[in-house]
Image (cartoon, grey):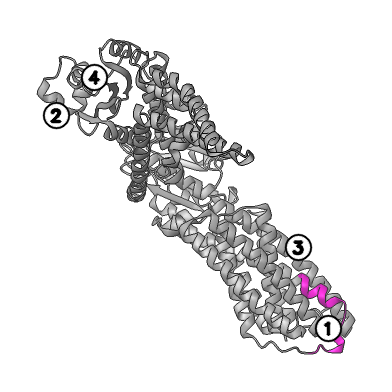
Amino acid sequence: MISEISFLLFQATIGITFLSAAGYLVFFITQNEKVRKLARYILLVSWGFQTLYIVSRYYLAGHTPVTTHHEAIFFFAWATTAAYLSFRWRYSVKNFGTFVSLLIFILLVVAASAPKELIPLEPALQSLWLPFHAGLSLVAYGFLALAFCGGLMYLLQERELKSKRLGYFFTRLPSLQSLDQLNSHCLAVGFAILCLGMVSGSLWSKQAWGTYWRWNPKGVCTLIIWLIYLVQIHQRFTVGWRGRRAAVMVVIGFVMVLVTLWLVIT
Amino acid sequence: MTTKRLSLLGVNHKTTPLAVREKLALAGGYEEPLLELKKVPGCSEHFLLSTCNRVELLFVSEPSLSLDDKMMQFLFGESVTADQRSHYSYLYHDAEAVRHLFKVAASLDSLVVGEAQILGQIKEAYRYASRHGCTGTLLNKLMHKSFSVAKRVRSETGIGSSAVSISYAAVQLAKKIFGRLDDKKVLLIGAGEMAELAAEHLVGQGVCGVVVANRTLARAVDLAKRFNGTSCSLEELSAQLESVDIIISSTGAAGLIIASEDVKPLMRTRRSRPLFFIDIAVPRDLDPALNDIDGVFLYDIDDLGQMVEMNRAERDREAVKAQRIVDEETLKFSRWQESMMVTPTITAMRRKADDICRQEVAKTLSKLELDEDDRKKVEKLAQAISAKLLHDPLVYLKSDSCRGGHDAKVDTIRTIFGLEDEHQQH
């Protein structure tokens, strides 16, 4: 019974998110304010369905559903949506939603293509640290995903301005300054949560294996991600790294996040 | 049959060379010509607009009486021959006149289509005309309508948003780079008309400071005073580059004023805050390689010119939309004008009275038990009351003696009897 509901919830989420992304795309092309509002409401509904799906999955698996590719990527999409909705609440960056909703939709499609069966968790890993560590890390990735979208937009807009061929994107994308601010905000929030995620992971490792740090691919990848973002934050606050360089760095960092998610979670 | 004939006589930058327009320009202000027009017999309402690009004379007269020649003579005076007069000017009547006025107000007829100044000029001209009692029911309605048409065009089309001059383009770019301009500083190198204009626009957008650098310091000081800014010499440029954000250069120098190598090391002290260089000098003042530095954007006069061209194309597309709005509103206004005639007003008044009678009689009769004869008597009673009540208003409406003409009477009656809404439904 629950597994059927869960399946339906997943299908509904994909459909609703598709509608939202399509709405944002229509807004991007036509700049019709009504469409944007509608798309935002649909995204909010999509987030509700995502949450319900995660809850249903929790019941089915008996632990926080972040241990398979399907579950982790779905949770990632959920975190990105939550990060966007919380961000949208405080700032408004023109046409940001178009990029983010597309990313969320793509993540959901990837989650859909991954095998959906439930894999029982190793007894060693069954701990209260699992939801803490995985949840925090994925929420951090959600914010870093926003920074990635902002970085892409920055690079597009900067190219238009530098090449002086002011075309399609010039009027539709926000100012470089606001994109840079977005970058700094998401990076700061994302990085802080990432640190908490790493600390909780280390404590979990101590509980499960008796050591705070293990040199496995997962540990190394996470360390690289952490260093990439650390360097950025450090440079921004000391010598004022910003603009193009900061945008390129968040894009690189995000690619690393994707690689880690795909390679490491099993 | 309309009760009044609306005519518009005008000259503008398209039809008339400046040499002729100069002779018409009403340098003495609006008062004198407005009062003079008041003396013209048969002209019941008039309005005059005079700007450097156009003169428009709007007047209302009896349809049987042609004031066209008289007005032409008034406008051109004796300086232009009759032949040339009709060649240089345009004359529209009724719906065409309305359409033209709407187009002018919506800035579709301007030299720079979409510029916002014209509406303010029309409003000012209208203030004069109404203060001197030159406008009446028809023109008051028409002028107010033209304001709302202009507003509608502005909000529903992008006609006002496209930057069609170099200085607008510079502001547009600055906004895309910096977002907010109110914490940005402008450095003006050299003093040229175009550079000053661009600086003026940026100040209008709220930049927080202006620094002027010039070879002759006295000129720099003068200009700085105008923008409430500070001045410096050309030798201090690189120190200034640390703190300013937008640089407009327009010196007559033969070589480069700022080289790429001068700016590169500055970016570190600036903590990579972006710099926006605008080079409107020919030959160029600024090193083209500046554009390759991270966080530095360089636009020269050709780049800005290209942007203006692009915006112009965009604006032409919007103008089509605006034209449609003007047509729509012209039609609406013509309908209103038709409704202002006496006959339809009488019909509307009678219909309203009849409707009320019928409704009230039906309401009362449904509660009473009367035979056919008594029913007829009650109906007659109601009709008699309404007919007697309408009698005097109808006499007033049909009379010719009243001051202010038919339009004022019709307007009063329509307002008192609430006929306005009914007209809207048709």
For disc 2, the chain is B
For the N terminus of chain B, the quadrant is: top left
For disc 3, the chain is A
Q: Which residues are magenta?
A: A120-136
Q: Which mark is residue A192?
A: 3
Q: CA distance from mark 1 to mark 2?
A: 90 Å
Residue mark closest to the camera, 3 vs 2: 2
Question: How busy is the neighbourhood of tag 4: few (under 14 within 10 Å), some, or many (20 plus)?
Answer: some
In the picture of the structure, the residue carrying the numbered disc 2 is: B87
Q: CA distance from mark 4 to mark 1?
A: 90 Å
Q: Is disc 2 in the same subunit as disc 4?
A: yes
For disc 4, the chain is B
Q: Secondary structure beneath disc 2?
A: helix
Q: Residue at x 77, y 85 (%)?
A: A1
Of callouts 2 and 4, the N-terminal one: 4
In the picture of the structure, the residue carrying the numbered disc 4 is: B24
Q: CA distance from mark 2 to mark 4?
A: 15 Å
Q: Secondary structure beneath disc 1?
A: loop
Q: Is disc 1 in the same subunit as disc 2?
A: no
Amino acid at circle 1 = Gly
Is B2 displayed left or right of A69 in the figure? left
Amino acid at circle 2 = His
Decide: is B188 above or below A73.
above
Are the two marked residues, 1 and 2, in contact with CB atoms closer than 8 angstroms?
A: no
Q: CA distance from mark 4 to mark 3?
A: 72 Å
